[in-house]
Amino acid sequence: MIAEAFGTAFGLTFIAELGDKTQIAILTLAARHGFAPVFLGSALAFVLLDAISVGIGAIFAKILPQTAVRIVSAAIFIVFGILSFQNREKKKETADSKSAFFGTFVIVALMELGDKTQLALVALTSKMGQPFYIFMGGTLALWLTSLIGAIAGSALSKFLPFKLIRFISGTVFICFGILIAVGVM
């Protein structure tokens, strides 16, 4: 039962997140800010969200109205997109790393709040009754998809000029914000 809970959570989550909007956002952020702050920010967001999913996910979903989550998420994406267009030099300073870490954490947490993988983990937990192993399977799968996205994004930053990355990043985030606002995502 333990292996089944872990394996089901891992397999289902990994397949669902591969190529998902969150992985694309992580790729874009890593191209702009580098591997470490983006991967660590997304990893922490997934730990938090998966803990909520298997612990109090069902209750949490009832407390926050979906419309409010959607509007706040959309606004944050659009603001991050607009800020991406600012003409700043690429810096690798500690403050920028902290900002990239926090920004990634917020973006991933909002993107995944109420997402299909979070809801799947809630359902798996209520069905299988193995919250720890479902948490571990789901979290490791999300970390793996984040790792893939962050590595790909970091590699892209070596081949693409920073201005192009900034433009692509801003455009992607504004598009995500609009799609979230109209309820497509």
Image (cartoon, helix red, strand yellow):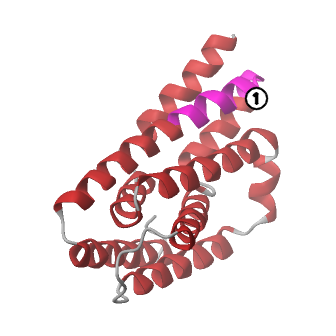
Q: Residue at x 74, y 56 (%)?
A: 61
In this rendered view, identify the residue nearer to me: 106 or 177.
Answer: 106
Residue ID at (74%, 43%): 51
Picture coordinates of residue 32 (x, y %)?
Answer: 36, 67
Pick the residue in front: 51 or 162: 162
Left or right relative to 85: residue 97: right
Camera-nearest residue between 181 and 143: 143
Quarter occupied by residue 70: bottom right
Q: Nearer the viewer, residue 117 or 166?
A: 166
Q: What residue type is disc 1 on? A: Pro
Compared with residue 6, is residue 172 higher up or lower down, i.e. above or below? below
Q: How many marks?
A: 1
> Would residue 174 appear left or right of 41 to someone viewing this image?
left
In the rendered image, the vertical position of residue 17 relative to residue 155, given as above or below:
above
Question: Which residue is depicted at the point 21% across and 75% down?
Answer: 164
Give the percent coordinates (x, y) of residue 124: 66, 30
Where in the figure is residue 49, as x and y percent of width and height?
68, 49
Classed neighbour count for the residue bearing mark 1: other residues with Cα under 10 Å, few (<14), some (14–19), many (≥20):
many
**Secondary structure under the numbered disc 1 in the rendered image:** helix
Look at mark 1 in the image and give the residue it sits on.
131
Q: Quadrant of residue 90?
A: bottom left
Q: Is 159 included in the stretch rendered in magenta? A: no
Across and down, in percent, residue 60 comes to 79, 55
| Rendered view: 94 above or below 7 | below
**Relative horizontal placement of residue 128, taking residue 41 as reference (left or right):** right
- Decide if residue 23 is on the left or right side of residue 106: left
Which residue is drawn at the image coordinates 46% and 82% (left, top)?
Answer: 78
Range drawn in magenta: 127-141
